[in-house]
Amino acid sequence: MFTFGPGSPGGDGTAGTGTEEPASHAGQATAAGPLPSPPEADAAPPPSPSRSPRRPGVPSLPPAAHAGELEPHAALDSSAASTQGEPSPPSPARRRPGPDCRAGGRGRHGLGARLFGWLRERSLGRGLFVDPARDNFRTMTNLYGSIHPADSVYLSTRTHGAVFNLEYSPDGSVLTVACEQTEVLLFDPISSKHIKTLSEAHEDCVNNIRFLDNRLFATCSDDTTIALWDLRKLNTKVCTLHGHTSWVKNIEYDTNTRLLVTSGFDGNVIIWDTNRCTEDGCPHKKFFHTRFLMRMRLTPDCSKMLISTSSGYLLILHDLDLTKSLEVGSYPILRARRTTSSSDLTTSGSSGPRVSGSPCHHSDSNSSSEKYMSRASQREGVSPRNSLEVLTPEVPGERDRGNCITSLQLHPKGWATLLRCSSNTDDQEWTCVYEFQEGAPVRPVSPRCSLRLTHYIEEANVGRGYIKELCFSPDGRMISSPHGYGIRLLGFDKQCSELIDCLPKEASPLRVIRSLYSHNDVVLTTKFSPTHCQIASGCLSGRVSLYQPKF
């Protein structure tokens, strides 16, 4: 039997300071419930909410819900007084139907709404007992905001050329550095010690690194090859993959099917089956081809593939099936248009994409788009697998001018995409966040998703001609973006809230949480540690900096 005290539900802050009541009286009081009282007795005021501590994660009852019930301590006092022969104080009267009862009804409705909100938060994976990491990341976000440039640590990279890419292992124990001069460097990010230098990892610039798990990782290069490595045996490559005909720029990995996905400036997206990998390589096939390809990414659930182009187009393959190869003309084009914005939401029409420089080999008019849609899909009103959507993302100040999408990243929960865009004249550069819009299609053959610009910020227009790689934090609350000779930590609001908690009605600027400048050259890439409160950045002169708070 629970006794009422400071840590128990319904107890007040002074319980436990006096003489302890017998358990029998407590049991009688709690079992009896509300006690009848003479009609002329006035109703006791409801207990103060401040005197009713609740357990974490359990919705508290409003004061109106307790109206008409006897406070537990009052019941104990009345029981104790009656045993000693003293007259007991009058008990509160029962509530009669009337205005007060209606107020109590509103309280019960408030309780229902509060309980519904709690259940909704639980279904979204929130709450102290559902997702403890949510509060941990909130603490880490506060730590990121307290980092100072003086807290940075320089890694000894000597002269290996520019740093093009940084990648942590999934457990955060290894930091890999892709260098301009054919080398890959490995560091222990905790101790800042150098582990290994792969002096001849490739025959040309190393562009991107991707971990398949905690020990296997892949690198790609301008020498048109991809190399697989094992942390347990770094003296030799696991294998080398040949298939691209031009510079290979980025690597993705589907953990469900164990398929490696690469893209290059030859316009090809190639699938590699690592399940059948040998010393001679892996079986591969060409999955997709488009002109002006810059970057390719998979959503966290691998349901979509996003491809950015130097002509300003963003291609989205919906209901992705990597087991099917898409030849030119075989995939249906669902729609080719400009992404929606706050101004577009109030107008009936939206501007179409530019005809010149289209990444597809078909006409971008609606009639030709529907030409390649299968008749069965039109009858059923659903989009087929690997259906293609062609978008022209809206960029602030770039409505009448072309732009190049140089960097492409995805929110860790798949809620949004992050783009770094530069104008064709290289006089402006922007970082933009686009939310995935799920809802009813405009036409029966339209996709179930499109993008809407939610946040943006103008970047420093330095280091022209070089691609700046930005990234989300592991929880998606912050963005680390190269900015001149340093990096900026950006948030959706000043409190670094979740994106879904602060979606604006109109596109709004990103908030600068912290600016960290510690390099002597233009920063090209930055990365958050997946497990520790640490950020890495690399610059054009080859220096790597680690930012972390000092305790």
Image: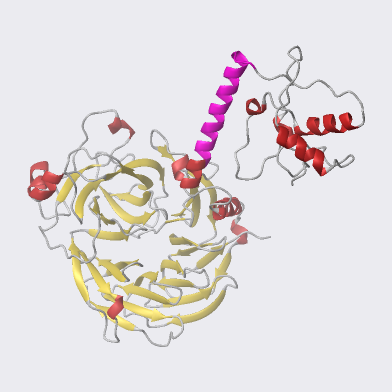
Residue 70 image point, x, y percent? 73, 28
Horizontally, residue 47 falls left or right of residue 478, namely right
Residue 544 image point, x, y percent? 50, 67
Residue 216 or residue 484, whichever sits in front:
216
Give the residue drawn at x 43%, y 65%. 540
Count of all numbered marks drawn on residues in the image: 0
Q: Is residue 400 above or below residue 333?
A: above
Magenta stretch holds residue 254: no
Residue 44 or residue 347, whichever sits in front:
44
Residue 133 image point, x, y percent? 55, 55
Horizontally, residue 138 falls left or right of residue 38, namely left
Magenta residues, start to end: 96-118
Horizontally, residue 218 falls left or right of residue 288, namely right
Residue 202 image point, x, y percent? 33, 79
Dominant secondary-structure state across the stretch colored magenta: helix
Give the residue drawn at x 85%, y 24%. 88
Q: How is the image coloured?
A: secondary structure
Magenta stretch holds residue 105: yes
